Structures are given as structure tokens and as C-alpha cells.
């Protein structure tokens, strides 16, 4: 299996995020991708190749053009108005306020974001462009029929980013960009299976009213866990998209028996949709020792995830999302791929 990877991810290296009432070192750091790539090479999964450049147009297919433009200029605006240190938002337009685009960078950061855990740094723009190109290059390999499966080793991750907001360590929604590219390249139906610990709220927001992209999410119950305000079981899609969004929220402490039941339910939903291609939002923060998560999967479970996905028999693009138990992130992410290849 080919892995697409760009070293430009390391240009995004946030200093701190607001978590647990404190500014702490970012959990989402370059080491994550270094370790996954090292594990790919150690296990001989296949070649590691650089992405092609796709420009901004594929990003504008799922993100609002003004949001794309904001991310391009945010660091410049921030340094001009504040200084050469990481930007974090601090106020948001909750219901009851008005969402009118402010002129200053503090206001814009709140307008286009959902949390204070997602810094914009000097190299963020280059890194998020590269991460989207990594996803698109993998999608193009699948779309052309050149490969039956591929791994887009994206960093930063993407599934919390919506059509016009960043957050949850995510800026561009790599999986959504890839799914849309597959559609534009001729796939009539695309399914996205999001197995990250957290709900993929951005992906849901982007495709919620569409019947051509099925989204299945297996995640921690938003009543307990980030992103808190989306991901409930009764969110099933809207308009034409009614019935094409399946949320499978699980309580803190969930281990393999319940989690794998949800995976089975999700895979049967995908199979019933009979898509032309599958995008897997591959987060491995379901691991028992993940520092920001509360599920209990063990390393030997991750190949079983890959095996079940393989039984769907679909052209499959794996897109890297979360996973923060850094010592094990490579073992667990590559474990899924090895299960897929061996299953
Ligand atoms: Zn996550």
C-alpha cells in the first residue's frame, strides 16, 4: 500500500493549547506523523511518496472561499496586529449574538473557529495546504483506479474543520476534501467511516444535507466529550441527506466488545449504501492510554478494525486523523493498515 506523506507538516508546530484551564504544550505535534511514517517503513507497508499539488480549488469545493482566504492571511494579520507568537481565539458568536465578520484579527479568529485548542502559527498555512494535498493525492490514486487502497498520512488532522470553521487541531477537512474529489472524479456515491475517538463534527456539517456522501461516525458521546455540541444519535441528516448520517456515540470507558459492535453496525450501513469508494477517517485516539481520551482499545485490536474494513471489498482511502499516545501511534495506525492488507 502506498503512503502519501509531506515533511511540510512539521512547519505547523504549535506551542500551546488551552486545555483543562491551562495553556499546555500541544498534544497535536510533529512527532505524531514522524512516528507513523517510521512505523510504515519499519513494517515495509509500501513506498512513501510525496503529494502532488492540487491548488486551492478542491478546498473551495467543501470550504467557503472566505474561510480559505482567512486561513491564508491569518498569520500575517495576527503578526501585524499582535506579534510573532501563536494565535489563539478567545471569543465566539454563540446563538443570541450576531455573526457579522469583524475587521480585526481577534474577532476573525472567533468568527472562523470553535475552540482555543487550535493555534495558528508561522507555518500553519504551508502545513495545512500540504496535508490537504496528501489527502487529494491519495484520493486521485483511488479515483484513477491506479490503486485499490492508499494511506494519506495527513497532519494536521481534519475532521473537526467545517465549511467555514477550524478547531480540534483541524483547519482543512482532509477527508471531506478527498471524498469530494472522488465524487468530482466520477464516483456516484462515497462513504466516509470515521473511527476517531472524537465525533467528526466538521465532516458531518459539510455533508449533512447530501445523499451522495454517507457519513458513519463511531465516537465518544458528546454529552461527555469534545466537541460536545454535535454527534448525537438522533442526527440522521437533513433534506436530501436524511438517512445518510449515522452517529454511533459510546460512553467513556468503552472497550473492544461494544466498540466492535458499533463498527459492525457502521460497516453494515456502509455496505447497504453500496458506495463506489470509501474514505476512512483513521484516528487511533481510541487507544486505552491516549492522554486526552477515555476509550479502552488495545494495540492488538487495531488490526481487527482493518480486517473488518477490508471485508467491505471497497476501494479505500485511509486518511490520518487523531491519536495522541505518541509512543504507540505508529503501532496502532499501521496496525489498522496491516489488518486491512492481511484481512
Ligand atoms: Zn480525535
Image: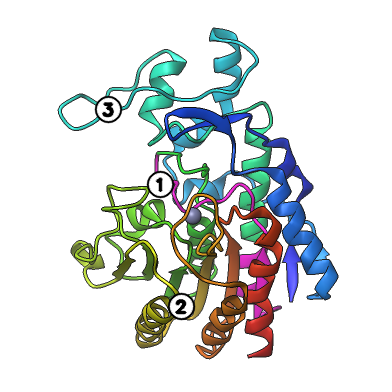
Residue at the spot 41% in from the left edge and 34% down from the top edge: 113
* Disc 3 target residue: 93
User: Label 2 near label 1: C-beta < 8 Å?
Assistant: no
Q: Which residue is mark 2?
A: 256
Q: Residue at x 32, y 64 (%)?
A: 251
Q: Is mark 2 within 8 Å of ligand 1?
A: no
In primary-sequence order, the first of circles 2 and 3 is 3
Q: Which residues are magenta?
A: 138-164
Q: If you read the primary sequence from the N terminus, does the residue marked by circle 1 or circle 2 appear first? A: 1
The quadrant of the image that shows the N terminus is: bottom right
- Prevailing secondary structure of the magenta residues: loop
Residue for point 38% across, 26% down: 110
2 or 3: mark nearer the eye? 2
User: Foreground mark, 3 or 1?
Assistant: 3
**Residue at the spot 45% in from the left edge and 60% down from the top edge:** 197
Q: Can residue 47 be spotted in the picture?
A: no
Amino acid at each position: 500500500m502506498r503512503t502519501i506523506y509531506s515533511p511540510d507538516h512539521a512547519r505547523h508546530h504549535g506551542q500551546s493549547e488551552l486545555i483543562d484551564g491551562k495553556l499546555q504544550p500541544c498534544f497535536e505535534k510533529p512527532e505524531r506523523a514522524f512516528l507513523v511514517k517510521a512505523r510504515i517503513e519499519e513494517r515495509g507497508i509500501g513506498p512513501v511518496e510525496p503529494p502532488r499539488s492540487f491548488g486551492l480549488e478542491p478546498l473551495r469545493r467543501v470550504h467557503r472561499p472566505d474561510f480559505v482566504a482567512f486561513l491564508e492571511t491569518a498569520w500575517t494579520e495576527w503578526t501585524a496586529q499582535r506579534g510573532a507568537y501563536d494565535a489563539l481565539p478567545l471569543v465566539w458568536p454563540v446563538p443570541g449574538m450576531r455573526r457579522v465578520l469583524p475587521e480585526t484579527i481577534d474577532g476573525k479568529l472567533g468568527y472562523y473557529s470553535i475552540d482555543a485548542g487550535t493555534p495558528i502559527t508561522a507555518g500553519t498555512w504551508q502545513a495545512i495546504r500540504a496535508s490537504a494535498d496528501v489527502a487529494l493525492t491519495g484520493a486521485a490514486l483511488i479515483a484513477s483506479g491506479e490503486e485499490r487502497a492508499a494511506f494519506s498520512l495527513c497532519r494536521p488532522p481534519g475532521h473537526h474543520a467545517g465549511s467555514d470553521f477550524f478547531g480540534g487541531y483541524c483547519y482543512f477537512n482532509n477527508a471531506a476534501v478527498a471524498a469530494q474529489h472522488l465524487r468530482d472524479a466520477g464516483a456516484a456515491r462515497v462513504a466516509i467511516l470515521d473511527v476517531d475517538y472524537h465525533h467528526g463534527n466538521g465532516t458531518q456539517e459539510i455533508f449533512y444535507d447530501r445523499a451522495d456522501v454517507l457519513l458513519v461516525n463511531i465516537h465518544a458521546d458528546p454529552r461527555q466529550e469534545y466537541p460536545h455540541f454535535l454527534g448525537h444519535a438522533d442526527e440522521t441528516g437533513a433534506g436530501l441527506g436524511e438517512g445518510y448520517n449515522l452517529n454511533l456515540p459510546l460512553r467513556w470507558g468503552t472497550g473492544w466488545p461494544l466498540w466492535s459492535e458499533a463498527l459492525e453496525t457502521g460497516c453494515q450501513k456502509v455496505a447497504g449504501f453500496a458506495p463506489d469508494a470509501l474514505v476512512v477517517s483513521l484516528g487511533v485516539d481510541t487507544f486505552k492510554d491516549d492522554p486526552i481520551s477515555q476509550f479502552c482499545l488495545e494495540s492488538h485490536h487495531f488490526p481487527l478494525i482493518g480486517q473488518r474494513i477490508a471485508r467491505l471489498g471497497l476501494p479505500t482511502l485511509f486518511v490520518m486523523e487523531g491519536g495522541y499516545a505518541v509512543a504507540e501511534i505508529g503501532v496502532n495506525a499501521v496496525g489498522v493498515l496491516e489488518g486491512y492488507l492481511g484481512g
